Image: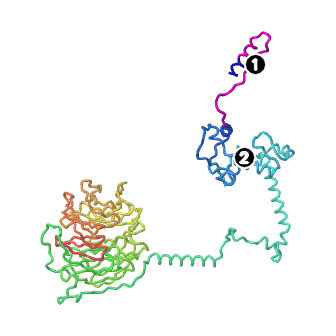
Amino acid sequence: MDLIQSYDEEEAVASSPESSPPRMLKAKSSAPEVDDTALALTVANVNRSKSKPIDPTQHVVLFNPTHEQMWAPIYGPAHPYAKDGIAQGMRNHKLGSVEDASIGSFGFDEQYNTFHKYGYAADPSGMHYVGDVEALKQNDGLSVYNIPQSEQKRRKIEKNKEEREGEEKKEEIEPEAENPATEAWLMKNRKSPWSRKKEVVQGELTEEQKKYAEDHAKKKEEKGQQGEAKGEHYADKSTFHGKEEKDYQGRSWIEAPKDAKANNDHCYIPKRLVHTWSGHTKGVSAIRFFPKQGHLLLSAGMDCKVKIWDVYNSGKCMRTYMGHAKAVRDICFSNDGSKFLTAGYDKNIKYWDTETGQVISTFSTGKIPYVVKLNPDDDKQNILLAGMSDKKIVQWDINTGEITQEYDQHLGAVNTITFVDNNRRFVTSSDDKSLRVWEFGIPVVIKYISEPHMHSMPSISVHPNGNWLAAQSLDNQILIYSTRERFQLNKKKRFAGHIVAGYACQVNFSPDGRFVMSGDGEGKCWFWDWKSCKVFRTLKCHNGVCIGAEWHPLEQSKVATCGWDGLIKYWD
């Protein structure tokens, strides 16, 4: 009621004309009084935090931060992540955060060296210089790296002048320098361990000196020739293992049995093992049947020995030939079998008498012979050809012991020599992956066969009809070449299936020419049909590499194989 009364009084007063101007009433709230101190503090904190960057130690943000706050740099020296107050993510240097300057390293070096030399340098802004202003004016603002050509010439002239003056001073001191007791002489003749030898101008030799020089050169040449010509020396020995060298009729042990004749012209593939010869202590590198008869088998071993075995009767070793200091690489019978050649890694070629075991002669060029061959003509059995490791084919006359010809065209070690065309020509293969055909006695290549797809051919054999060559290619195939004028590759005939990559496995033909035969790197002996080029049979012959395979010249179904397991096996 009091409120209403007071309101009416005030209204009456306000309505009177003489009353004062109207006054605003004081606002009053009907809500209960509440202590709003805590609320005011909270609002104040929020307003303040909106202007501060976000604390990275906080796990909860109680307001929506602005973009500037989120990307603002972190301030304060006592940052929890680094001792120097810089967050680890902002550090790009051991000393903290380093910014790139607006000056390159070359420009810095230039101004640095200019300041140290002349006493002034350009400000990085490029607007003005700092340092010695007088020196700047005097040098016209030059730096150490852009000296004008005139200045360079002047300095060069001054330097030359100083050098000349120094030489003149030395000449003045010269008489003193001639005395070995003085320090000047010691300084002049002092020699640095790194100094080069002074070139001494050679005067004319006296007669005595000339004579001595000639004798010395002659001795040196003789010594070199002796060293080259002789391979490793080894005492030649031979041991006979049979009962007696001659029988009751006086016939030699190397003579063929009278009843040894070819039964049939038709050849058959062997099926079973008949005999094993085990006399070599290391691998066997080559085998050869006695020519025409095949009653003896010659073998070359890596144990430096050559052995000859009886094939028809006892099957035992008849004689051992010891004359090489290293492994024997190749062997070759003469036409009648009374003599044979051996080539060893001791750089020697030896010519043996088969019956007595004596060395008739020894040949060497100081290089390793990889293949040896006698000329197959009966009237040229004294001519020896050897393919050497120094890319040459050397021809000797066995009677005189002299080198009569050298065939030097290959670019790699010579691997094979094969006579063709009635022995008027011969084909050679080499590590240079080529075949070369030569006219016998003329050191000029008449046919050169080399294709990009060709591989090295370490073994070549002639077909019994003389028209074809079988070449063992190291890309696991046997290729056939014609022996006619053009020596063309027969693309229709190709024998494959065996693995010979890396091994010089011998390739051979059956005496009737119906089958092709080869060893391989896995110890197998492969037989192919000549007409169809299909694999006819494979025999597991050796543990390791089957390096050699020879068909018996008379007994049509018998084959001998040799391997790196040291065994020679006879198959029927």
> From the viewer's perspective, is residue 137 above or below residue 478?
above
In screen coordinates, is 533 left or right of 195? left
Q: Which residue is drawn at 38% across and 67% down?
A: 393
> From the viewer's perspective, is residue 275 above or below residue 502?
below
Question: Are there few (<14), some (14-19), or many (20+) residues within 10 Å of tag 1?
Answer: few
In this figure, which residue is indicated by the disc labeled 1? 23
Q: Position of residue 415 (x, y in %)?
A: 35, 66
Q: Nearer the viewer, residue 68 or 392?
A: 68
In screen coordinates, is 525 left or right of 258? right
SS assignment for the magenta stretch, majority: loop
Q: Position of residue 447 (x, y in %)?
A: 34, 57
Disc 2/disc 1 C-alpha distance (Å): 80 Å
Q: Where is residue 291 in the image (x, y as percent from the top left)?
A: 23, 74
Q: Which residue is drawn at 74% across and 13% down?
A: 12
Residue 15 part of the magenta-drawn span: yes
Residue 492: which disc?
none
Q: Nearer the viewer, residue 470 or 410?
A: 470
Which badge, 2 or 1, comes first in the chain's sequence? 1
